[in-house]
Image: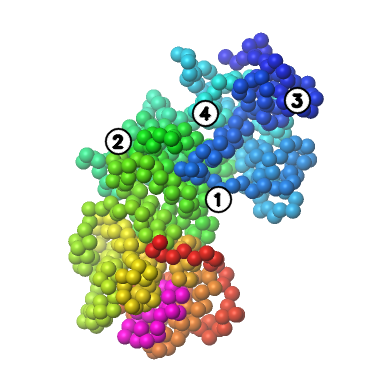
Amino acid sequence: MANTPSDREYATKACAACRSKKRKCDRVLPACTRCARLFQNCQYDSEPYSRGFPGLVAEEISESLASHFQRIVPTEQARMKSRLACSKCRVGKRQCSKDVPSCKRCVRTGSVCRYDGLEHEDSADTALPPLLLPSVGVTELVDGHHGLRSYPTNVETDVSEDPDVPITGDIEYRTDCTMEEIAKRVSLQYQGYEHTSAVTRRTPSPLTIDHTSHHYLDPFHTYPSNLSRETITRTFHYSLQEMWPRLFPGLKHNGKSFTHEWMQLALACPPLFRAWLHSGAEHLLMRQRASGHAPSPTSRRDTYELLLMRQDAIVALKNAVNDDHPNTVTDQIIMAAFALALHPHERHPVAASRMRTAPLSNLQWLTRFTDIVILDGHVQGIRHLVQARGGFEKLEMPGLLEGLSTWDLITSTKMLTKPFWPRRTKLQLDSAAKFLAKYEHTDVTIGDFHALLWSEFPHSIMWVFHALRGYSSLLEGYSDGRLSDLDLGYILDLRNLIHYQVLSLPSARDDKVGNASHKYESFRLAQTIYSLLVLFPVPLTTTPYPELARLLRYELEMASKDGWARIPTLLLWILALGGIAALGTPHRLWFVQKLHMQLGNLGIISWEGFVHIMGTLIWLNSPCGIEGLILWKEIQQHGHQPLAEYKPTLGLVHDEPVRLGN
């Protein structure tokens, strides 16, 4: 029941804000009417706990969370601040947080935030939707009581037009809220948010459920979350029934699917449940954006709900982890942190436009995860949690070891480092080599050339070379329909094993490759580029291609020209892969010019002749043939062009080098 004026509690003195401005204060707890109307903190000196409008509580939770959780899994970078208030706050003579690109008030009200002197690309389509208070009835279990406390169902106040309009409807606040209850209250604040426009009514939200097409995983709604049942059912159903199983195809627990086991673990662990809820929603919306759907009021609402899910998941994870007591870290907590790190909000904006995928490249949703922005804080945070648990081998939750191994491959690929954890697979190198040898195309000429390579390079890098050749031939057979009955679970393990070996190859600085270090390092970097194009596809122009191109150019410039006399076609292959990786960088023309010279030395004058030479080493028409043809046209056009006249148009080159093998 809503509070009446006689039921309200009052402070003994005016709040600090009203006293400082010498204004009348009604002293209502926990926030006076004036402070609630102005969306500002209301602090009573005589009260142990006072808070203002619930929207500010959400902001304070996020800020306190960032300071606490940064030591384990840092969430966001420091906010940028403007020196002046935004134009909307200045016109309304309201307090402005001065956050860039949007202040807190404009984010809360869905307004376009503009700062004088700063460039903006905002539009009405990018503004967040207006905040609506709950329009549906909810209940919350109150600590210290055995009953349920009801929250109002008639509050539906749109504050998008004027944030200073008094809030109508009686809202019950408590002054003894714990952090967990505050997090729940933030969820309740946005639970009833929905657009009422005709466009939204005609376009169902991908985060809500169609009652005729989905079954409830939990018909009695025992989920540890305060979001609506429809949203929870759709996203959690997608997360556990489609997204996560496709990350681990063929994985079994006690002879059956691990989905049921995960369901029981998630219901018993609220942080894990909320992390999987967020990961399912993030991945569902990501697939919708990847399909080319234009932004709509519905998608903006979904983004709003997604931010709420992310905050809810991070708050729950932060509350569950205690830095002073490592025993609080469980497999479920590590899986929750892994799910959040695997679905960050930041992604490379140009990734999709430069993605030319090879067959089977989307196993484990790989094309959806290799364009994410890897934050070092996320990586170090998960490693810290695993260490607190007792080490990688101590993890027991089904799928966790496999998931972290794949995550380790993604982070090592983007950061150009060796894998941190051992690869979890039943495959052995010898059995994998025998399986791949069945698909590798060889003849007498190619065999003699490969024997020459064995005499030039150590066994480890030649094993990777033949593994890449065999896997490429396997992909060709699959795309042609000749190998349609492949066990995709086995192929997945095989792919990850090969890429793991590529990243694990010793670098020239390890003093394990003899005197021909620059030639070896060039070969190793070229194999890394090929693996990123075909096995573990990463979009061109994104990390780590620019750095790989820079490192490869350095090694080729340092290598002796006489060192390639016996294997000139290998040099051609290395230059071709370096040229593909250098797309959009200042190094592109250098590779174009070197390729022009090497093609002349070998007497290759046609594209077909070039592809034939590439086939004697390692080559796959998609994506190598497509990107190689673009490179071939540049060789014809810019082969003699001076470096100063060449201006790349795509991508950037990192100023601080990152060396493979750290």
Could you tell me which residue is drawn at 73 percent across and 27 percent down?
17
Amino acid found under the numbered disc labelled 3: Cys
Could you tell me how far apart the alpha carbons at marks 1 and 2 are, in whole angstroms? 37 Å
Residue 334 lies in the magenta stretch = no
Q: Earlier in the sequence, mark 3 or mark 2?
A: 3
User: Which of the numbered marks, if any, corresponds to residue 261?
Assistant: 2
For residue 65, above or below residue 611 = above
Q: Nearer the viewer, residue 328 or 289?
A: 328
**Residue beneath disc 3:** 18
Check disc 2: other Cα within 10 Å, few if <14, some if 14-19, many if 20+: some
Could you tell me how far apart the alpha carbons at marks 2 and 4 are, in whole angstroms? 29 Å
**Is residue 151 in view from this perspective?**
yes
Could you tell me which residue is drawn at 45 percent across and 79 percent down?
557
Q: Earlier in the sequence, mark 3 or mark 1?
A: 3
Q: Earlier in the sequence, mark 4 or mark 3?
A: 3
User: Which of the numbered marks, if any, corresponds to residue 139?
Assistant: none
- Look at the numbered disc 2 and give the secondary structure of its residue: helix
- Look at the numbered disc 1 and give the secondary structure of its residue: loop
Colour approach in the figure: rainbow
Q: Residue 183 placed where, x, y %? A: 52, 30
Residue 116 falls left or right of residue 509:
right
Residue 562 lies in the magenta stretch = yes
Could you tell me how far apart the alpha carbons at marks 1 and 4 are, in whole angstroms? 38 Å
Q: Residue 180 placed where, x, y %? A: 49, 28
